[in-house]
Amino acid sequence: MKAILNYNRMKTMLTLATVTLVTLLSCAQKSSNKEKIKDTMSASPFTGKTETATFGTGCFWCTEAIFKELNGVISATSGYSGGQKPDPTYKEVCTGETGHAECIQVVYDPATITYDELLEVFWKVHDPTTLNRQGADVGTQYRSVIFYHNDEQKQKAEKYKAELDKSGAFSNPIVTEITKFDKFYPAEDYHQDYYMNNKYSNSYCSIVIRPKLEKFEKVFKDKLKKH
């Protein structure tokens, strides 16, 4: 009887440990509420021609941290797109009922970095074959998606996707959604620059974002900003 009790106690402890780990590795953790930012991009001294791209690769904390490292990217803003409810909150998007995806809006200098290069990064920094899921983050808000801003972006995204599928680059079919951009709502202030502001205090940053960022920096070291 004592052996059975010890076994049941150990089984319970393992279950609690597993639940705790999954919670720590999920993007949808509770955060302190702050007002939503008013602008879709931070001020920049750049005065030349810019273009805009909008991508969803799962948790926008990861996506923002990666794209901000690219030379030619002027700003990368975390937010929501692709849904029905106007001006949604993070809590509402997390229910999966608003139709929005967590994404980033990238403003970039096309003379320094092209849309094709941004697409290359997009395909390589997440798994485009998992439907409505990236790692421990599950739900339609974490779907793989490209919101195209014009016909040229649409054609390039569709061509790239078709070529990747044909080449067998992934063992499973790509499920990335390619849809026309409509509206982008910036996420709450505390989501902006999340990795930079929380990399030493949040376990998701150290366990999930940092390893992904390090891998990205090795693969795309020739495209990074010089600090």
Image (cartoon, grey):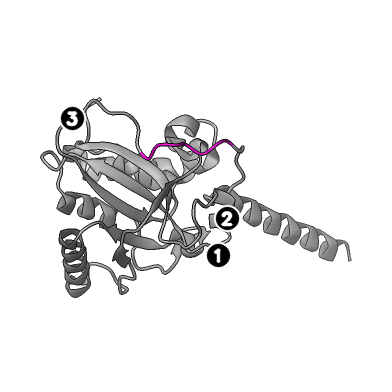
From the viewer's perspective, is 147 left or right of 80? left
Quarter-of-image position of residue 76: top left
Q: Please report the bounds of the magenta region as a residue range.
A: 34-40
Question: Earlier along the polypeptide chain: callout 2 or callout 3?
Answer: 3
Query: Could you say which disc has been placed on residue 47 in the image?
Result: 3
When the figure is inspected, residue 34 is found, relative to residue 86, above or below; the finding is above
For label 1, the crowd category at 10 Å Cα-Cα, with few meaning under 14, some 14 to 19 and many 20 or more, is some
**Do labels 1 and 2 touch, CB within 8 Å?**
yes
Tag 1 residue: 97
> Which residue type carries mark 3?
Thr
Q: Is residue 122 magenta?
A: no
**Residue in the picture at 24% in, 51% down:** 121
N-terminal of the pair, mark 3 or mark 1, is 3
Element class at badge 3:
loop
For label 3, the crowd category at 10 Å Cα-Cα, with few meaning under 14, some 14 to 19 and many 20 or more, is few
Residue 181 on image: x %, y %: 31, 59
In-image side of 184 versus 198 (left or right): left
Residue at the image point whose x is 47% and y is 63% from the top: 84
